[in-house]
Image (cartoon, rainbow, N blue to C red):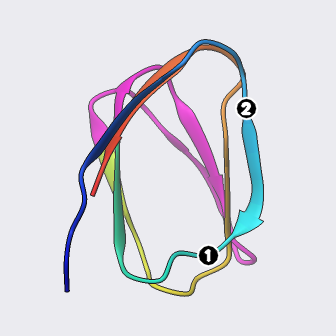
Amino acid sequence: MIAHAFHKRFANAFDTGMRTFDQPYLLYASEGAFHLETQARTWLLLPHRAALIQQACPIRIWTTGPATSSSV
């Protein structure tokens, strides 16, 4: 498995809609908060916290304002 690291600054609120990842996905909230929603629950990923998203798990990720993420 090849892992890729990403760092992205979102200047405006965004919404991914429901999506899946081909492999496990680690999302770190560097700045701002991220809302995460699966079919079973919704939670808030606060700054300086991370979430491990299962492979092929349908998930929606959104923000209500600017945010920065790092992911692998």
Where disc 2 sits, the SS reads loop
Q: Quadrant of residue 58?
A: bottom right
- Assess whether residue 32 is covered by the magenta stretch: yes
Say few, some or many: other residues with alpha carbon within 10 Å of mark 2 (under 14 / 14 to 19 / 20 or more): some
Residue annotated with mark 2: 14
Residue annotated with mark 1: 20
Along the viewing direction, whichever of 42 and 61 lies nearer the viewer: 61
Residue at x-position 76% and y-position 41%? 15
Along the viewing direction, whichever of 2 and 9 lies nearer the viewer: 2
In the drawing, what numbered circle is on residue 32?
none
Q: Is residue 3 above or below residue 31?
A: below
Q: Earlier in the sequence, mark 2 or mark 1?
A: 2
Residue type indicated by callout 2: Phe
Q: Residue 40: x percent and y percent?
A: 71, 77
Residue type indicated by callout 1: Thr
Residue at x-position 36% and y-position 78%? 24
Which region of the structure is painted magenta? 29-49
Q: Is residue 29 above or below residue 59?
A: above
Instruction: Determine the CA span between mark 2 and mark 1.
Output: 17 Å
Along the viewing direction, whichever of 35 and 1 lies nearer the viewer: 1
Residue at x-position 59% and y-position 51%? 43
Q: Quadrant of residue 64?
A: top right
